[in-house]
Image (spheres, rainbow, N blue to C red):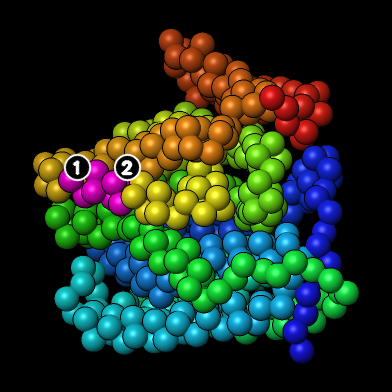
Amino acid sequence: MTATLERPALESPKGMLRGAVRGGVANLAGTVCTGLAGVGVTWLAARALDPQTAGAFFAATATFGLGVTVAKLGMQTSLVYWPARMRATGDLSRLGECLRVALGPVAAAGLVIAAGLWFAADLLPGRADLVRALAVFLPVAALSDGVLAATRGLRVMRPTVLLDRVLRPATQLLLLALVWAVGWGPDVFAALWALPYVPVALLAGLALGRVRSTVTVPDHGEPTDFTPRRFWGFTAPRAVASLAQMALQRLDVLLVAALAGLAPAAMYAVAGRFMILGQFVNQGVSQSVQPRLAERLAVRDTAGANLLYRQATAWVVLAAWPLYLLVFTYAPLYLGFFGEHYEDGVRITRLLAATMLVATACGMVDMVLAMAGRTWWNLANVGLALVVMLGVDVLLIPRSGAFGAAVGLCAAVLVNNLVPLAQVVRGLGLHPFGRATLLACALAAGCFAVPQLVLLPVHGLVFKIAATGAGIAAYGYAVMRFRTVLMQGGR
């Protein structure tokens, strides 16, 4: 039975933002769980495994992440974009076909890539047994991401939050804590890290079935512009761009392992692990805004799309800038948390934190381009950033080790944000710098950066902690005081 929706009237700006806020708050709450669990997994790996084996584990998970990204074929964006467009025009009659066109190739690609990793494991950096332990779970990991994306395309955020943000990372953390307590080997450590993808995939499928069953049958609706050819025209560049994007996040760990050794790779992975928290914040907000942004752009509502983009950027800055500023200030304490082997990574951590402040202020530029249908632009941008990173890495890692990789990553992050920002401004007439964004930047800098700058001549951790405590209190008060501007955006 096919299903269509009556074409929904566009929400008012306030209603649009309220809906995005509800989804964003839920996603951010789940993101906190994901981020904390991710740091916990890193801590367990650093504590339970020696530096060489920990480096091999991080290299194996990086390989697994790259494999999952290839297997998804860019579908996680397409399965938001097309259902959202169908909803905007009031016709979901071809939703089932859209799902079949997307998920069938993902399943096939996952099986092929898993088999390739299994047989090529001996040729990859790190330990072959860890790569093989993860490869078994690669197809279900790719499918779970695709299915959850389809639920988000229909504006249902709960499955993503509960399954991908809470259940999976929490289960990973608990299972790895069990491995550490029992003293099992690294191969079991890796396998149990990947095992939670299985129940998440099954539950995601059930959730998508429930979402589809709630769709009502209307009396009218405009025909959707979906066709398999248009679907693949949108998806093909996203598939390559997604791989390049994941390579930006993962390949540097593999290069450090290959060019400088496994122990430096472990230090590099630990020093930059905090970036995952910021990326999850960005992802949590963008996933809430993404379907509404696609709907606005589908009906050429530039003003509504601009309001969403600016507001989402303000939310990300509010949540992520304090994190990056605190990590910059307390980098030695942060690294000492993982053990004495990692205390030499202070320069790496501070360089990455400073770079992420700039990237966060640009907003989710890649997602804006994708939801506007500019997937080829997105591919060119990510490809350029990857070339920059690889060039710097090959030049600097043999000389400077992990710090050289950090320089390469920072250069790539800046390219991957500033270039698309210029395209969004000139090509789409959108930009992230509204009143809410500028206010969020000023509040975070004033409450967290300025006090530490004032205290630079003063030595003593107690003074820094006292200043941080006062900054947190002032930040909370200021956010409540200016909540109307921060929640409603503005020009």
Please identify the quarter of the rendering in which residue 352 is found: top left
Helix, strand or loop for disc 2: helix
Q: Position of residue 271 (x, y in %)?
A: 37, 45
Task: Give the alpha-carbon distance from disc 1 to disc 2, as whole Å.
Answer: 9 Å
Is 459 positioned to the left or the right of 444 in the image? left
Above/below status of 283 relative to 410: below
Residue 460: say if magenta.
no
Please identify the quarter of the rendering in which residue 351 is found: top left
Is 118 positioned to the left or the right of 21 in the image? left
Name the image quarter holding the N terminus. bottom right
> Could you classify mark 1 by the number of other residues whose Cα lies within 10 Å: few (under 14), some (14-19), or many (20 or more)?
many
> Could you classify mark 2 by the number of other residues whose Cα lies within 10 Å: few (under 14), some (14-19), or many (20 or more)?
many
Mark count: 2
Above/below status of 446 relative to 408: above
Name the image quarter holding the C terminus. top right
> Magenta segment range?
382-392
Q: Position of residue 26 (x, y in %)?
A: 73, 55
Per the image, the residue denoted by label 1 is 392
Label 2 near label 1: C-beta < 8 Å?
yes
**Mark number, residue 105:** none
Per the image, the residue denoted by label 2 is 412
Rendered residue at 55%/16% (across/down): 450
Indicate the amino acid at tag 2. Answer: Ala
Asked if residue 380 can be seen in this view, the reply is: yes
Asked if residue 344 can be seen in this view, the reply is: no
Of residues 249 and 417, the one drawn nearer to the viewer in this rendering: 417
Q: Position of residue 490 (x, y in %)?
A: 72, 27
Of residues 45 and 241, the one drawn nearer to the viewer in this rendering: 241
